[in-house]
Every structure is written in structure tokens, then in C-alpha cells.
């Protein structure tokens, strides 16, 4: 590896969230003997994985964010922000920054990014590992209905007025404007602007994790009788599912999109183990 490699990656670094540059930031790999890891993030798991890797002196870790969140969470490793420009752009980035291993830790509904990651990694000859939360599974007491997308969720709400909690993200909420008969409580990380023009909608800005007791209080306080959500998996946003079960509230779940068939793990521990295995195989092959 040469020092250009470190500088190429550093040129993309737009923020060192959480304070000083760590010894493992790409710009500090001046003797070029570290492995370069790119994590595609925007999730709690990506941040947690980066936290585990930040202290390692054999790795330069960069975290990539889409750059749409107004105030992104503090991150433990250097961050680059914004789209790559499709498959070609990502493949070019992987080669220019001499990424050894790409970890796709995006949200399970970020299907475009995951598809691009699979194609770009193949094109650039870079190993790819996906870290993806396992979906929630219904248990006794859950009243779930799975739908394909937001449009089907709107139809599933029916004609009679309901009190609906929407926790599905900014991109999907617009579909509900065709059903103004309902009362909505809409929770997002960033504001919905302009607002949807629904006659009875309350907007709530909040970022998880959300405790079950707080979710119960929120849902009963607003007399919610149905929830529309993604099957995000993980613990951070499971509170509303558990609260719905206790309160006997129905849940409409948007089905997960189809993701590329790539090596996939569901936990941070498994990701760390698979990463070490991949690093060892690179070394064994003299790469
Ligand atoms: N979808 C959700 O429900 C959800 C929920 C929580 C968090 N997130 C996070 O929010 C971000 C955007 O999600 P999305 O569903 O809008 O993605 P998406 O539809 O799969 O991706 C759309 C485009 O956004 C850019 N992009 C997405 N993730 C990126 C990343 N981590 N780094 C750099 N560029 C990225 C890429 O642009 P180019 O083609 O130009 O490279 C991608 O083609 C992701 O980081 C995801 O992990 C999503």
C-alpha cells in the first residue's frame, strides 16, 4: 500500500464525529500497512460495529452515510457523506480508496444501496459482507398484517376513520395523503417538509431507541388503534411492537424488500468473526 491510498480516502472524509481523528483514520495510514474497511451505514448496527473496530491498529475504517439526516448521530470513526453516484461511482470509490472489505450495514429497507454494493464490490473485486438485522417474528398476542408497500398499507387501513401511528420513514408517508379520513400521528427522525396536507396529522420528531413503556404511553395517550411500520428488526424500535401487543393494537408491516444474495450476518459478534476470517484469508492469499 502507498501513502496515496491514505490521502485518497481522506479526501472523502467530511467529518470526524466524536472528536479527534483516531489512529486508524485513513489519513493516518501513512505507512500503508493497514487494511481499509468501508462500512455503509445509517443504522445503529453500523455505528456499533464501527465502535468495535475504531480501536484496532490494523484497520482504517470509514463509515459512509447517505447524508440526508439533518443532524446525524456522532460516529466513532471518520465519516464520508453523500451518494457515490450509482454502481460505477461506488466501484470507483472502492478502487481509489483501495478498500479491502466492504461491509453493507445499511437498513434492511435500503435496497437500492445494497444492490449497488453487491454489484460494485463484484466489479471492483472487493469482498462484501452484509450485516442485516433479523426481521421481527410474530408471537402470541400480536395482530399483524403484512403488506407489500405503503399503497397496500393505505388500503389495509380501510374506509372507516382510524387513529393511525405511522412509523415508516419520510419516503413512504406521502402515500397516506389519499386517506384523509384517518387521524395520524407521524414520527420521523427529520421533519417532513412540506407537511402532507392531511387534515388531522400530528408530527413528532424523535430518534430511537424507544423504550416499550414510553411507546405504550405514547400509543395510549394518542388513542392509537393501528400502527403502520417496517419490519426493521433489532431492539431499538421493537418497543412499539411490544406495546401494541400489550394494548391489543393491530400492526400493519411493510414487507422487507428483496436484497442481494451475499454473505450475510445478523449480529455484531458474527460480523466481527466474519471480518477477521476475511482479513486472514486476504493475508493468506498475499493480497
Ligand atoms: N430505508 C429505511 O427505512 C431506512 C431506515 C433507517 C435508516 N436508513 C438509512 O438511511 C440511508 C438511506 O436509506 P434509503 O432507504 O434512502 O437508501 P436507498 O434507497 O437504498 O439508496 C438510495 C441512494 O442513496 C445513497 N445511499 C444510501 N445509503 C447510503 C450510504 N450509507 N452511504 C452513501 N450513500 C448512500 C445511494 O446513492 P448513490 O446511488 O448515489 O450511491 C443510493 O443509491 C441508508 O444509509 C440507510 O441505512 C434507511
Image (cartoon, rainbow, N blue to C red):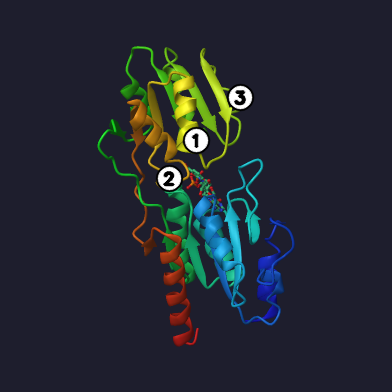
Label 2 to label 3, Cα distance in Å? 23 Å
Classify residue 231 by image quadrant: top left
Q: What residue is disc 2 on?
A: 109
Label 3 to label 1, Cα distance in Å? 15 Å
Of 199 and 18, nearer the camera is 18
Of 147 and 137, nearer the camera is 137
Place of residue 84 in the rendered image (x, y in percent of width and height, measured from the top left) = 58, 55
The residue sitting at the left extreme is 140
Q: What residue is disc 3 on?
A: 194
Label 2 to label 1, Cα distance in Å? 10 Å
Q: Are marks 2 and 3 in contact (CB under 8 Å)?
A: no
Q: Identify whether 278 is placed above or below 133.
A: below
Place of residue 27 in the rendered image (x, y in percent of width and height, measured from the top left) = 71, 70
Residue occupying the point 52% across, 42% down: 209
Disc 3 versus disc 1: nearer the observer:
1
Number of numbered discs visible in the structure rendering: 3
Place of residue 238 in the rendered image (x, y in percent of width and height, measured from the top left) = 42, 41
Q: Helix, strand or loop at disc 2?
A: loop
Q: Are marks 2 and 1 in contact (CB under 8 Å)?
A: yes
Residue 124, labelled with which disc? none
For label 1, being within 8 Å of ligand 1 is answered yes
Of 270 and 123, nearer the camera is 270
Residue 169, labelled with which disc? 1
Classify residue 79 by image quadrant: bottom right
Is residue 144 at all visible to an observer of this figure? Answer: yes
Place of residue 213 in the rendered image (x, y in percent of width and height, measured from the top left) = 47, 33
Q: Helix, strand or loop at disc 3?
A: loop
For label 3, being within 8 Å of ligand 1 is answered no
Amino acid at each position: 500500500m502507498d501513502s496515496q491510498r491514505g490521502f485518497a480516502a481522506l479526501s472523502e472524509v467530511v467529518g470526524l464525529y466524536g472528536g479527534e481523528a483516531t489512529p486508524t483514520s485513513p489519513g493516518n495510514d501513512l505507512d500503508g500497512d493497514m487494511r481499509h474497511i468501508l462500512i455503509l451505514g445509517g443504522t445503529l448496527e453500523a455505528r456499533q460495529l464501527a465502535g468495535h473496530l475504531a480501536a484496532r491498529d490494523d484497520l482504517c475504517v470509514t463509515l459512509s452515510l447517505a447524508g440526508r439526516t439533518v443532524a446525524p448521530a456522532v460516529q466513532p470513526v471518520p465519516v464520508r457523506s453523500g451518494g457515490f453516484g450509482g454502481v460505477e461511482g461506488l466501484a470507483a470509490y472502492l478502487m481509489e480508496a483501495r478498500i479491502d472489505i466492504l461491509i453493507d450495514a445499511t437498513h434492511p429497507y435500503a435496497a437500492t444501496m445494497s444492490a449497488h454494493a453487491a454489484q460494485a464490490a463484484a466489479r471492483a473485486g472487493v469482498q462484501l459482507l452484509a450485516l442485516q438485522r433479523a426481521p421481527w417474528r410474530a408471537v402470541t398476542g400480536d395482530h399483524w398484517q403484512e403488506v407489500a408497500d405503503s399503497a397496500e398499507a393505505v388500503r389495509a387501513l380501510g374506509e372507516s376513520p382510524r387513529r393511525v401511528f405511522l412509523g415508516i420513514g419520510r419516503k413512504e408517508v406521502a402515500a397516506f395523503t389519499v386517506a384523509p379520513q384517518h387521524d395520524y400521528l407521524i414520527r420521523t427522525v427529520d421533519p417532513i417538509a412540506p407537511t402532507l396536507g392531511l387534515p388531522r396529522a400530528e408530527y413528532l420528531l424523535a430518534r430511537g431507541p424507544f423504550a416499550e413503556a414510553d411507546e405504550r404511553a405514547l400509543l395510549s395517550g394518542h388513542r392509537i388503534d393501528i400502527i403502520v411500520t417496517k419490519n426493521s428488526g433489532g431492539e431499538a424500535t421493537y418497543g412499539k411492537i411490544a406495546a401494541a401487543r400489550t394494548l391489543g393494537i393491530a400492526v400493519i408491516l411493510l414487507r422487507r424488500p428483496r436484497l442481494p444474495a451475499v454473505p450475510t450476518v445478523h449480529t455484531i459478534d458474527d460480523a466481527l468473526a466474519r471480518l477477521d476470517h476475511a482479513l486472514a484469508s486476504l493475508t493468506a492469499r498475499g493480497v
